[in-house]
Amino acid sequence: MAKTEKDVFSFQTEVGQLLDIVAGSLYSNREIFLRELVSNASDACDKLRYASLTDTGLAQTSDEFAITLDVDKDAGTLSVSDNGIGMNHQDLLDTLGTIARSGTGAFIEALKAEDKEKVGLIGQFGVGFYSAFMVADQVHVQTRKAGDTDSWLWSSDGKGSFSIEPGQKDTTGTTVVLHLKKDAEEFLEDQRIRHIIKTYSDHISFPVKLGDDALNTASAIWTRASKDITEEQHTEFYRHVSHAFDEPWHVMHNRVEGAVNHTSLLYVPSSPPLDLFDADRKSHVKLYVNRVFISDTTQDLIPAYLRFLRGIVDSQDLSLNVSREMLQSDPTMAKIKTSISKKVLSELKKKAKDTDAYATFWTNFGAVLKEGLVEDPALRDRLLEVCHFSSTGTEGLTTLKGYIERLKDKQEAIYYITGEDSSKIAKSPHLEGFKAKGIEVLLLSDHVDEFWLQHVTKFDGKLLKSITRGAADLDNIASDEDAPKNKDKTDLANLIAAFKVVLGDSVKDIRSSKRLTDSPVCLIADDGDMDVNLERLLMRHGQLQSGMARVLELNPTHPIISKLNDRAQTDNASTDELLGDAAHLLFDQARIVEGEDVADPVEFVRRLSSVLSKAL
Ligand code: ADP
Ligand code: MG
């Protein structure tokens, strides 16, 4: 590159907006800028250490990685230097001036809403570098990329533009020089700096030096004994590896010695990461080989259904010289993956004993974990043990085992209903007969429920049965003592015959219902047909063109149905106009309760008006 001049560039619009807010922020925890710069320096050292594994020409500095802080009181500057990977001209343009990562828009919106404390989240959004402008009115970045001979100086006052010109750095790495604002001179004080590093950066595995002193412990945190790691240190490390700002909900630190030696330090977040439901379902656990950072995108290390985990895995049994691509098919990786999955599930099983605390976890990550029921048949039983469900039988959540313990006499199945909205399905007419008999029904409202239920059809010898499909075989099951007895045995044959003529192909069948007590009608899927909610999901995603005709069930104990039935006791019932309108209206009513549209809105309104005017 033969550039010799100074070029001036405008910040990308988002960066400009971000800087305006950050620079003017009255955020009280401004000290976090140092955490962000040290974190970047540490990442840069990690990157060079990895690059030098495969490119021996870069190896010269490998063992001496360090992050060095320098204070110049006269000039009013604090600088953060590293001997890491460095940046070339293009890197500077790509990373310091533009924002590659998504989610920044949301961050800017949050900041605009005057929510000052949110500034502390800056690192989580992949824009931590810009926090330098909270304390500095001039930032200079001197940098030289490993393997290059030329260096660059990036500078900006954070007001709309930055410049890049040839630099004078004769060693590999980066030095960020902050010209501190008048009101930020506290960050020139030795004690203040020491305290900040100890608080936020103790876990950094390279020494962070001030003069000749290393301010941090500088040993990889996961190599320490579990009892020597404090809760604060875990929190800081968790935030560092995950770019998150919450507390870990659970910490799992394990050393496995055996077929494949590895150490893992994994965290379950207490709030869901932003990309949890992104289509690529990426895991973010970092892979180290003998304390050397290898990759944070290794998809074969953690199964997709555990993608909420954050942290690291370190194994000395993987080859250091293997490329990231080759790691993916390394059989050692598969062994580590299985071992970790089992360990995590057994930890969750322990945590699940405290149902209240587990509810937080379940609300955040239950839907993700359930993907494993489909994807990991080998661990399906262990997964089922840690799955919790809403149910009509308990206040909070229940396990399948808990459900089995509450089975009624002669109850042979585990009943469930699926739907998209938990509060809606809890009020579904399909539940009426089950409620009346005191029979518990699981309420399943995650999308994934439809899919795992295709794979898991039994638990503990009991069939899992949808209450919106097939006949409701409630007669044999013993009722609660005080439950109302189903007194009415009315024969609906004539009414059903008349309705069948009127509704024709729009229904598959019409039957007298055993599951209804309060509502006059409901729709169900026939035995062997696709369950109603699954069909709806598939149609919405264009994987199914049209739905199947359903079975319409009539409640013989409901006054509307029994009066209509009385009226149907004639030979010409199928041509009775009122019976015809009623058939359509009741069919539409059943659809409405399911959250669907009426078959024909114009006809619906005409029939409703006609029936009303006859009643008046
Ligand atoms: P993040 O660290 O989350 O990527 P930052 O805003 O902190 O976001 O940094 C943006 C990018 O700038 C980094 O990803 C890296 O590519 C580059 N960068 C920042 N500081 C350094 C450094 N000291 N050495 C090398 N690259 C750096
Ligand atoms: Mg950063």
Image (spheres, rainbow, N blue to C red):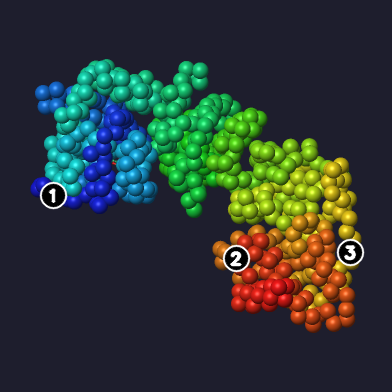
Helix, strand or loop at mark 3: loop
Nearest to the eye among marks 3 and 1: give it.
3
- Between 300 and 503, the residue placed more toward the observer is 503
| Residue 579 sits in quarter | bottom right
Q: Are marks 2 and 1 in contact (CB under 8 Å)?
A: no
How far is disc 2 from disc 1 in space, using C-alphas? Answer: 55 Å
Q: Amino acid at mark 3?
A: Thr
Q: In 3D space, how far apart are the residues under numbered discs 3 and 1 (Cα atoms)? A: 89 Å
Query: Is residue 331 shown above or below 514?
Result: above
Q: Who comes first in sequence, dot 3 or dot 2?
A: 3
| Left or right, 534 with reference to 201 | right
Quick check: can you spot residue 547?
Answer: yes
Residue visible at 24% across and 35% down in the picture: 134
**First of labels 2, 1 by sequence position:** 1
Mark 2, secondary structure of its residue: helix
Residue shown at 22% from the left, 49% from the top: 11
- Residue that numbered label 1 is attached to: 7
Q: Quadrant of residue 68?
A: top left
Q: Is residue 407 above or below residue 226?
A: below
Graded by Cα atoms within 10 Å as few (under 14), some (14 to 19) or many (20 or more), the crowding at tag 1 reads few
For mark 3, what is the residue?
A: 490
Extreme-front residue of the structure = 616
- Within the image, what quadrant is residue 246 found in? top left
Q: Is residue 378 visible?
A: no
